[in-house]
Every structure is written in structure tokens, then in C-alpha cells.
Amino acid sequence: MQSERGGAAAGRQRPLVCVVDDDESVREALPDLLGEFGYASLAFASAEEFLASDRIRDADCLILDVAMPGMTGPELHLELKRRGHATPAIFITAHTDPALFPRLIEQGAVECLFKPFSDVALRDAVVTALATN
């Protein structure tokens, strides 16, 4: 289920970061943290939910979980690119496959973060992603 932080008016005055993660605790914590950084945010429970939303064009940055049931974060990123949406993406994961991150960076990811990651690492990744948009 989609949840919005930052309000509709604030959402267009501030960059919109969309979080797509099947973990409810991540969907609750990251938007609060992003709000502290000054960003508007939306959280989605799945890639399919995000694709079905009317917010794809509004997103200035994506934070995508790598491993989700159904469509994965990398699959979502590729599908968005196929549809002509080159929204900068940050991938997050609890899996520690050393070959994964270079592959994602090669496919166009801005950054890849292992869970748990620091507030500073997330903020820096979002700043970098927004600078590329």
C-alpha cells in the first residue's frame, strides 16, 4: 500500500523520493528519515504497486529493494528504463553478494547500499542521485 509523507504541496516543492520495498519496517522508517533530510517521499510495497501508480513520472529518485517477491528492484529499474523513465535509482539489500553491486552500477544504478546502512550513506546517495537527474 502506498503511503505519502511530506504532503501534496510540499511534494512538488521538494524532490520526491519513492521507496519500493516489501519490508514494512523499511517503508515506515525511510520516509521519516527522508523527511528529516528535506525530501518528500512515497512508499510502495512492491514493484507492481509502483508501476500501477500514477506517480512514476513524479519521482525524482528511487530507492529500490533488490530482492522482493514478484518483480525485483533490478527488474523494476530495467522496466522503467524500457518505458523511457530514466529516474536515478539507489538499490538497497540485506544480501551480501559481492558481484551484485558492480552489476547494478553497470546497469545504471547510482548507488548500492547494504542493510543496515547509515543515515549519512543514504543521504549522500540521494544527493548524488538527485544531482544526476
Image (cartoon, helix red, strand yellow):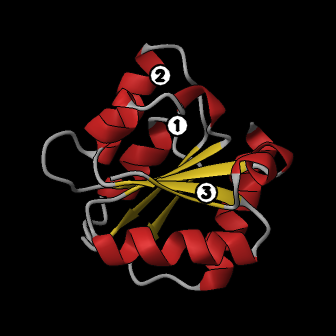
Q: Nearer the viewer's eye, disc 1 or disc 3?
A: 3
In the rendering, which numbered label is found on residue 41? 3
In the rendering, which numbered label is found on residue 108? 1
Give the Cα separation between the discs numbered 1 and 3: 22 Å
- The answer to whether 33 is drawn above or below residue 124 in the figure is below
In the rendering, which numbered label is found on residue 81? 2
Q: Is residue 114 visible?
A: no
- Label 2: state its secondary structure: helix
CB contact under 8 Å: marks 2 and 3: no
- Residue type at numbered disc 3: Ser
Q: Which residue appears farthest toward the front when viewing the image?
A: 8
Front-lying residue, 99 or 49: 49
**What residue is rendered at 65% in x and 63% in y?**
125
**What residue is rendered at 45% in x and 14% in y?**
83
Give the Cα separation between the discs numbered 2 and 1: 10 Å
- The answer to whether 119 is drawn above or below residue 30 in the figure is below
**Looking at the rendering, which quadrant does residue 21 occupy?**
bottom left
- Residue type at numbered disc 2: Lys
**What residue is rendered at 59% in x and 49% in y?**
110
Could you say where residue 14 lies in the image, as x and y percent from the top left? 81, 52
